[in-house]
Image (cartoon, rainbow, N blue to C red):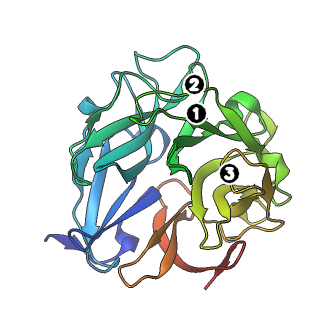
Amino acid sequence: MNAVTSLTDIQVRDPFIVADEATRQYRLYGTSGFGEAAHGGFVMRTSRDLKVWSEPQPVLAPAAGPVGATHFWSPEVREYRGRWYLFGTFMHGTEITKPERRYTRIYVADTAAGPFTPLANGPITPPGWWSIDGTLHVDAHGTPWLVFVREWLQVNDGEIHAVELTPDLLRAAGASRRLFRASEAAWSRPQTRDKFSGYRVTDGPWLHRLPSGVLLLLWSSFGKGGYLTGVARSANGEVTGPWVQAPAPLIATDAGHPMLFYTFDGELMVALHTPNQAGEERAKFIPVRETRDGLELA
């Protein structure tokens, strides 16, 4: 296996880990490049120890993505009903509803290594919305949901939404429901950039159910200290909430876009990218512990 020596050699945003029990390999997916540079499709690297990684292997080439798409962001690869699904965020394209520019689309493969092909024609997120970072949540009743961001660029106070999907993931089974706005978290701060002022970011939602049954939602925003990761708790254990925000972020050191995975030794880790600076982003894995109603750093 051709390999690099360390995660410090790999520029990646939005890191996503699959701990593949069948091969005893960790698979790393993510956004390569930043902004206009993130146009090369999606690739995957493998590792036995989370330290030494293979060279990248394509799993979704640009030509296999949405026609006319210019950005490939935030890939999530999940096993569902015996197949593997890639939830990707894309920008632009010839098959979308104006003024929609950012959207999530689903791809499918027989293995986590791909190659992935389109599951259905067009985005799974609502027409006309600027939607990113779609993640799959299967609730306690076995119902699949897409949880995603409605971007601050469209609503100013960024939102996180959920929409029920049909069991085959081909389409939405109902209307989108807003779970919360960024401003509902005390640690989130308004931002100013170029012509934009007072906006708040929502980014990278990830759901996790504790052994106690409590449902958590990890997400990122900007606050004191930069790009941070916080946790919300569902008051009733359902994805539709209501959601209660933790008063302080879980990760307060310029690291975000979280997801959780278990190592082959059973250790729970949160994967993030840090720093949040274009071209400098690296994947970081931080051990965390489950409490009765939340998470804490291990």
User: Which of disc 1 and disc 2 is earlier in sequence?
Assistant: 2
Look at mark 1 in the image and give the residue it sits on: 131
| Residue lying at the far left of the rendered structure | 1
Q: Residue at x 35, y 26 (%)?
A: 120
Instruction: Name the spot of residue 251 as percent of width and height, x first.
Output: 67, 70
Residue 276 in sight from this viewpoint:
no
Q: Residue at x 36, y 44 (%)?
A: 86
Bin the neighbour count of mark 3 within 10 Å (Cα to Cα): few under 14, some 14-19, many 20 and up: some
Bin the neighbour count of mark 2 within 10 Å (Cα to Cα): few under 14, some 14-19, many 20 and up: some
Of marks 2 and 1, the one in the foreground: 2
Q: Which mark is residue 82?
A: none
Residue 226 appears in which quarter of the rendering?
A: bottom right
Q: Is residue 256 left or right of residue 152?
A: left
Amino acid at circle 1: Ser
Q: Please report contact status of discs 2 and 1: CB closer than 8 Å, yes or no.
A: yes
SS for dot 3: loop
Q: Is residue 12 above or below residue 69?
A: below
251 or 259, which is in the foreground? 259
Instruction: Name the spot of residue 255 as percent of width and height, x first.
Output: 60, 65
Q: Is residue 215 above or below residue 160?
A: below
Instruction: Name the spot of residue 177 as percent of width and height, x first.
Output: 69, 34
Q: Which mark is residue 126?
A: 2
Amino acid at circle 3: Glu
Amino acid at circle 2: Pro
Q: Which mark is residue 238?
A: 3
Q: Residue at x 46, y 67 (%)?
A: 283
Of marks 2 and 3, the one in the foreground: 3
Quarter of the image containing the N terminus?
bottom left
Q: Residue at x 29, y 40 (%)?
A: 108
Q: How many marks?
A: 3
SS for dot 2: loop
